[in-house]
Image: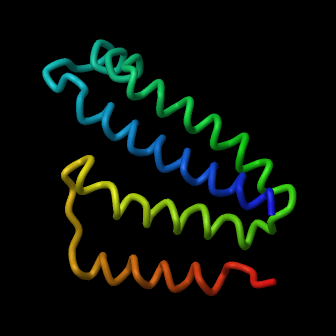
Amino acid sequence: MREYLFLVVALSLNAAANILIKLAATRADASEEGLPAATGLYLSPWFIAGIVCFGLNLLSYTQALQKIPLVVAYPIMVGTGYLIMVIVSRPLLGETFTFIQLVGAILILAGLVMIIPRS
């Protein structure tokens, strides 16, 4: 059961990393171009925090994969990550999604319910 805790930590860190990198990208100075713009983006605290989260995600996901089959772990990681984005992207990033995308998210959730092993 410990391996699923590692998977939850990994998918949470992955979602956090994506949000942080999106925040870095949207806060980058659009008036600059080339190397100054890239430097400002890649040295921003949001971007660096996102990279740290990706690194910690990798460590935790590796621990989860020691016991969980990849055909179970990967869909949980990606599907749950998408569902987290649906929930937090509007309040944190001001993003919206369509009704069809909402239906797709519900289908992803249904698929995840079928993938999770029962014991």
Q: Position of residue 16 (x, y in %)?
A: 46, 44
User: Is residue 90 placed above or below 26 in the rendered structure?
Assistant: below
User: Is residue 31 placed above or below 23 in the rendered structure?
Assistant: above
Quarter of the rendering occupied by the C terminus:
bottom right
* Residue located at (80% from left, 64% from top): 1
Q: Position of residue 115 (x, y in %)?
A: 66, 81
* Chosen colour scheme: rainbow
Q: On the rendered structure, is 76 left or right of 39?
A: right
Residue nearer the viewer, 105 or 37:
105
Q: Position of residue 39 (x, y in %)?
A: 36, 15
- Considering every residue shown, the one lying at the far left of the view is 31
* Residue located at (37% from left, 80% from top): 104
Q: Position of residue 22 (x, y in %)?
A: 34, 41
Quadrant for residue 38, please give it.
top left
Residue nearer the viewer, 88 or 98:
88
Quadrant for residue 76, please give it.
bottom right
Quadrant for residue 99, please give it.
bottom left
Residue nearer the viewer, 85 or 38:
85
Q: How many marks?
A: 0
* Residue located at (80% from left, 68% from top): 69
- Considering every residue shown, the one lying at the far right of the view is 66
* Residue located at (39% from left, 21% from top): 45
